[in-house]
Amino acid sequence: MRVDWFYKSCKLVIKPVLKVLYGLRIINKENIPAEGGCIIYANHTSYLDPIVIGAMLDRPINFMAKEELFRIPIIGSIIKLWGAFPVRRNTADITAIRQALNVIKRGEIFGIFPEGTRNKEGRVTVLQPGAALIALKANVPVIPIFIEQYKLFGPTNIYVGKPLNLSQYAKERADANKLEEVSDMMYEALFRLKA
């Protein structure tokens, strides 16, 4: 469970440091809704990614993170206080999916890195279907974010795409074909931000 005073305090310290170190610039931040539940998803090149997104966006983010991180002393406690919750990778983790949907129902932002692992080359790789499943079940705006590879003293740009509207799928069964179709849409939207 996120502790808001802790999240805000960390952000006050971390944001200026990251901006100096990496020359962070966020492009089209207005594409993030000012209120209401939504999903953000991003490419994943570094362990810094959730910290950078959390620091640079105005609203708090609740990230899904691999369960192994929660076993690391101190780090596990800190990421819990930041609102992260665990997922077992390479499985259909129903508990994690329910937790993501509960975050969204509370009117908060759920964040995920759907490539499933870090890709240090900065390419956008195939997205895992879990993000599409959550997007279909939640029926809220789904917003792509592309983070450039970090450059010491920058500039390092973070591009926020326009929300995807998946409402046309809301009443349809989330079968394998639909998941693939939505995953492809999400991939294309993320890939276009890179171009």
Image (spheres, rainbow, N blue to C red):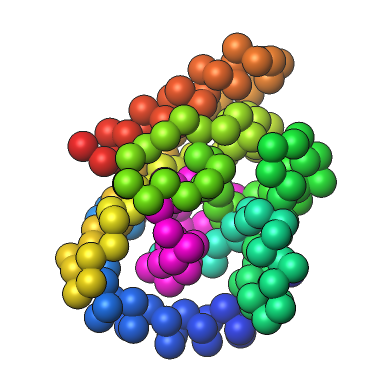
* Position of residue 141 measured from the top left corner of the image (x, y, whole percent): 50, 40
Image x and y of residue 44, in percent: 44, 50
Is 165 in front, or is 89?
Answer: 89
Question: Which residue is at 43% across, 25% downward?
Answer: 185
For the magenta stretch, what is the residue range? 30-56
**Residue depicted at x 64% and y 76%:** 75
Look at the image and say whether residue 156 sits in the magenta stretch: no
Q: Is residue 108 above or below residue 73?
A: above
Q: Quadrant of the N terminus?
A: bottom right
Q: Position of residue 96 (x, y in %)?
A: 75, 47
Classify the position of the C terminus by image quarter.
Answer: top left
Residue 81 position, x and y percent, is 67, 75
Q: Is residue 33 magenta?
A: yes
Q: Quadrant of residue 69?
A: bottom right
| Residue 33 in view here | yes
| Residue at position x 60%, y 21% in the image | 179
Query: How many marks on residues?
Result: 0
122 in relation to 61, above or below: above
Hey, which residue is sitting farthest top in the picture? 177
Res 150 → quadrant? bottom left
Q: Is residue 165 visible?
A: no
Nearest the camera: 60 or 123?
Answer: 123
Q: Is residue 30 left or right of residue 23?
A: right
Tell me the residue at 23%/72% (across/down): 152
On the image, which quarter does residue 177 sit in? top right
Q: Which residue lies most toward the right here?
A: 95
Q: Is residue 189 left or right of residue 50?
A: left
Q: Nearer the viewer, residue 74 or 178?
A: 74
